[in-house]
Image (cartoon, rainbow, N blue to C red):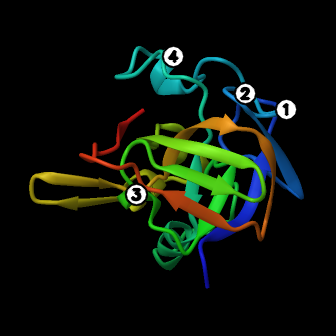
Amino acid sequence: MSPSVIAVAQDGTHRFSKFVVPEICLLKGLGVEGDAHCGENVKHALARAGGSNPAKPSADPSFPIRTIRRVCQKGFTVAPADLGENITTGKIDLLALPHGTVSCIGTTAQVEITDFRIPCAQIDASLPGLFFAVLIRKPGHLMRRSGIMGVVLEGGIVRAGNAIVSQIPVGPRRALERV
């Protein structure tokens, strides 16, 4: 099976989870049409609190389906959109992709991967203990298991079942950073 979209979601209100919908419309440079995070600048809690990257362009979180399966194996009941992602993906290791990778989704949409998506306190408010369930600690290293962020380079309609083709940038690779 090739990399693909498992589900798409949006929510016009700032809350932790989103709602699965039949399709979303990605808007160039803005994000998901009708979503509370749509706009010219990122509107996430870490950015509003003066986090590491407060002026990042608007981005779309995506969350690998295998991460959802891992937290379910730890006893949590989590489905696509429950963790606030707009695009839930399958058969692609998003967390291993370098900064600047362009993911082509469906027929026209293109999203440039820019950062890791770091879980905030809202994740535990939604499901106590989930914050640590999406992180893997190794000596001297913390693996972020909360997805990625990206900037919409080309807009388009995205639906469950759409193929995802990732174009890795040529040259030195820059690791993703937290948003």
Q: Type of residue at label 2?
A: Cys
- For residue 38, the mark is 2
- Secondary structure, mark 1, is loop
Q: Type of residue at label 4?
A: Arg
Location of residue 158 with respect to 69 vertically, above or below: above
Q: CA distance from mark 1 to mark 2?
A: 7 Å
Q: Mark 1 and mark 3 in contact (Cβ < 8 Å)?
A: no
- For residue 48, the mark is 4
Whichever of callouts 2 and 4 sits on the residue coming sooner in the sequence is 2
- For residue 95, the mark is 3
- Secondary structure, mark 2, is loop
Whichever of callouts 1 and 4 sits on the residue coming sooner in the sequence is 1
Query: Is label 1 or label 4 in front?
Result: 1
| Residue 33 horizontal side relative to residue 167, left or right | right
Q: Type of residue at label 1?
A: Gly
Q: CA distance from mark 3 to mark 2?
A: 23 Å
| Residue 113 horizontal side relative to residue 42, left or right | left
- For residue 34, the mark is 1
Question: Mark 3: few, some, or many residues within 10 Å (few <14, many ≥20)?
Answer: many
Front position in the image: 84 or 175: 175
